[in-house]
Amino acid sequence: MRATQSIASQRGQALVLALVLLFAALLGLFVLFSSGQVVTTKQRLVNAADAAAYSAALWRARVLNFHAYANRAIVAQEVAVAQAVTLVSWAKYFERFTGNAAPLAAAWPAAQPVLAAAASMARNARELTEAAAAEEVRLRAAPSVGYKSLLARSQEALQRAADSFGLGAVANEVVRANDPAFFAFALGDASAFAGFTRRHASDDDRARLRDVVVDSLDRFVKGPRRDDLRLLLLPSSCFGRTTNVDRWFRWWRKRGGTEMAPDLERWQAVDTGSIHNWRKSGFLFGSCRQREWLPVGWGAAEAFDGVESPGLLGDTGGTRDNGLATALAESEMAAGAGAGPGSYSGIERVRELNHGALDDPLFPVSQVVVLARTEAGDVRTANALDVGIGRLRLFEAFAGNRLWAMAVGEAYFRRPPAAPERIEYASLYSPYWQARLAEPSAAQRAAAQRYAN
């Protein structure tokens, strides 16, 4: 009887143990499930943040490459303007040369019809050249509406699109493409990217662009367009009166060139050709000196943004050697390469790296810090799914009640692998800006931590 009572009193103890074990197993299952969901979501969020940071850095690199392409295009517009002015000057010179050569060839009657036809063709060519050059200068370089002015303004628009706010929009689009529940933005950089580049402001800055343009001109445009020829059929006034045989004959002097005026607001071109004579100076013991005897051809053109032509400045291509011809060319010079005043806006103010503000002026990098997050309720843990009650209910503790991920991308300058092997320092004239992910610095981690908390 007592044994039966003892056995009966022990009944139910296994059930309590089973319930404890079941509770522990359910709790472990919920923890395991929730941990797995957090880890999976965190990994997806990290991958999305990396993709967003890389995409934001890539957009910034493309903006820097656009600046490079735009600067190259602006240089090309300046070269085209210089070429147009040069062609007008040369066309005027050739027209005047052929027109003056016809009377000079009176001693050769057979040549007169040829020269007359050439003069007519030269006149038509000059008119066509002036009309074409006028339109070309206006389209490429007119103030505010010319192609190079539009390029410079597009640089400013895209510069704003590559700041932290613009990159934040790019980053958010990328993470939302991964999961609509994700959100991302770019941390502010204390105007670091605003100081990464700068727009030319002073004439010293513009002079550097002028130098790039001049280096890009072909040999004919850059000049000097110079030629010297001894005219053996035209003896000089010193013939037989000096031991220098070169001074026994008259000389043909061709002078010309194209250059930007010192104020950086005007292209000017001039071409002249004159016959020079050697004359005895003094009565008995004077020496033979060269004098411009007969101007034969002359022409000049300019492109500038003004109302009245200031005339030729300096000694373009050594043209002052033919002083009379230069004076005639200057008196006939039409403003704006035949296009009238107001057709040229001067050397443009472009964007360039702000070398003085860069940590590494030779190989600078521009970083963007991206923070991605998702709400705690969007992490499909047991708590978020409303699984479990009482002691079986688990509550997660996320920073700011959100799950966070951080990534850093950077734009950097490097020549592509297929490019010739040589060192090229960073600039906004070569479109070699690329993007990559970078390791966050301690300061960036601390800034992200402060923001998340």
Image (cartoon, grey):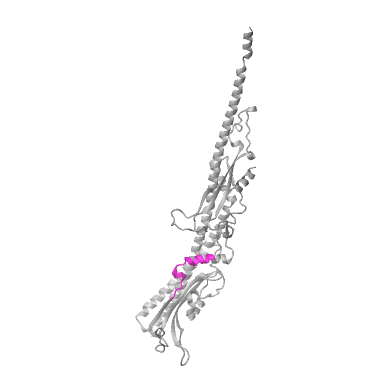
Q: Verify whether residue 219 appears in magenta.
A: yes
Looking at the figure, which quarter contains the N terminus? Answer: top right
Q: Verify whether residue 428 appears in magenta.
A: no
Q: Which residues are magenta?
A: 208-226
Residue ID at (56%, 41%):
45
Relative to 225, 37 lies left or right = right
Hey, which residue is sitting farthest left in the picture? 110
Relative to 113, 209 lies left or right = right
Looking at the figure, which quarter contains the C terminus? Answer: top right
Q: Vertical placement of 437 versus 291: above or below? A: above
- The part of the image, by quadrant, that contains residue 152 is bottom right
Q: Vertical placement of 273 versus 61: above or below? A: below
Relative to 225, 368 lies left or right = right
Residue ID at (56%, 51%):
367
Residue ID at (61%, 20%):
17
The picture places residue 88, in percent across and down from the top left corner, at 47, 71
Q: Vertical placement of 453 versus 248: above or below? A: above
The answer to which of 432 and 78 lies nearer the viewer is 432
The answer to whether any part of residue 179 appears in the image is no
The picture places residue 318, in percent across and down from the top left corner, at 48, 76
The answer to whether any part of residue 57 appears in the image is yes
Residue ID at (57%, 66%):
204
The answer to which of 41 and 311 lies nearer the viewer is 41
Task: Tell me which secondary structure the magenta stretch mostly adopts.
Answer: helix
